[in-house]
Amino acid sequence: MSRFMGARYSMFDAYTPGEQPQDRRYIKLNTNESPYPPSPKVRQALNADEVEALRLYPDPECGALRASMAAQLGLDENQLLCGNGSDELLSFAFMAWGSRGAAFADVTYGLYRVLADLHQVKVTNVPLRDGFALDDRDYLGLNRLIVIANPNAPTGMALKPRQLAYIAEQNPDGVVLVDEAYVDFGAESCLPLIGRYDNLCVVQTYSKSRSLAGARLGFAAGQAELIRDLKKIKNAINPYNVSRLTQRAGIAAMEDEDYYLLNARAIMQARDNTARALQAMGFEVLPSRANFLFARHAGIGGAALYMALKKRGVLVRHFGAERIKDYIRISVGSQEQMTAFLDAVREIMGGIKA
Ligand code: PMP
C-alpha cells in the first residue's frame, strides 16, 4: 500500500478470487464456471458486424437485453437492471441500501464482507445453525440490508422461497437481497415474489448456468423503486457498465433456453454422481442445489487435500476460515472431469490409509 491511500480504504481486506492459472492446464473445478461453452447462438451473434460496432458506446440502458429478459421472466422492464456481472450489482446494493447496516450469514459468499467494509456498512453476522442450516427465525426484525445467497455459497444449501418471503415480511424497513447465482441447479427462484414485496431484490448471473462468466453479465430484479435506487448508483459509477458484446451475447443466450436447461441437467447429474462417489469413500458431503459440492473427510484436512489435488492437476477451492477449513469446494464440471477428480481423490486417500 502506498502512502497515498487514505484511511478510508486502507483498513479493509480485499476479496481473493479463485485462481485463474495461466501457467499450466488444470482440471479447473475452483470457480464454479460451466464446463460447457455458450450456446452456438452466442457464437453467431458475436459476428464481424458487432466487432465493427465496437467503436460506439453500448446502450447504457441495456434496452434490448432488458426487453428480452423482461419477456422471458414475466417482469416489467423497469423492474430490471443489468450489471457487469452480479458482483457489480451487489456492490451497488451495499451502497444504495447499507446505511442502516447489513446482515448476512457467517458462512456465505466472501464478497459481502468485503463490500460492506469497502462501503463502510456495519455488519451483523448471523451464524448459520448446526449443519450450516440457515434459520429464517434468525432474521426477524433486523430492518437493515439482509443479504442471503440462495443456494448459499460455499455450502450449496438452499431455502424455500416462502422462507425468504417470511424474512421480507419481517423486515419491512430493510431490503432483502436474494443472491440467486446458483439457482438454476435445482433450487427455487424468488423472482415470482417480487410483485408482492416492495423490499425484495433478486440478483442473478449469466456466469454459471449460462456459461458466460467471461462476458460479465448479471441482473437485479425488484419493484421499480428499488431498481431506480440501483440505477442511480450505476449511472454515477459506470453508466456504460455492460459492453456491447455482452449485451448481444446475453440476448442470444436467452434465445437458447433449452440448450442451457440440458447443460444444467447434466451438471446436476454429475453433481449427484460425484456426491455419491465421495460418500462411498467416507466423505461427508453437504446437500447441494448448486453447481458445486462442499465436502470433508475425517482423514485429511481441507488445505492438505486441496494441495494434493493441485499436485495432480486438479484445482478446487479451499477456504481458511475456522468453521469451514476442513472442507473443500468442488465445482461440478463434465462427467469426465469429475471422473478424473474422483480418480485423483482415490489415489490420495489410498495413500493415506496405507
Ligand atoms: N454471488 C455468488 C454467491 C457467487 O458465488 C458469485 C461468483 N463468485 C457471484 C455472486 C458473482 O458472479 P458474477 O459476478 O460472475 O455474476
Image: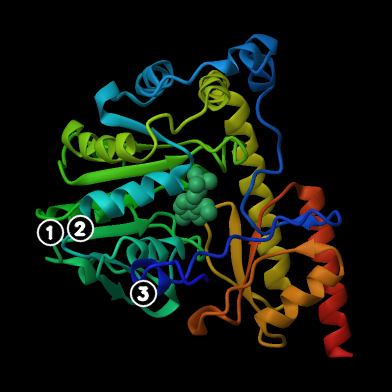
Q: Earlier in the sequence, mark 1 or mark 3?
A: 3
| Residue of label 2 | 167
Mark 2 burial class by Cα count in 10 Å: few <14, some 14-19, many 20+: many
Q: Quadrant of residue 5?
A: bottom left
* Tag 1 and tag 3, C-beta contact below 8 Å: no
As displayed, is residue 170 above or below residue 304? above
| Residue of label 1 | 170
Mark 3 burial class by Cα count in 10 Å: few <14, some 14-19, many 20+: some
**Picture residue at 52% right of the left edge, 71% below the top:** 1
* Tag 3 and tag 2, C-beta contact below 8 Å: no
The label shown at residue 128 is 3
Q: Earlier in the sequence, mark 3 or mark 2?
A: 3
Q: How many marks?
A: 3
Q: Disc 1 to disc 3, how far (Cα)?
A: 19 Å
Pinpoint residue 354: horizontal percent, then vertical percent.
89, 90
The residue at label 3 has a CB less than 8 Å from ligand 1: no
Residue 281 visible here? no
Pinpoint residue 305: horizontal percent, then vertical percent.
74, 77
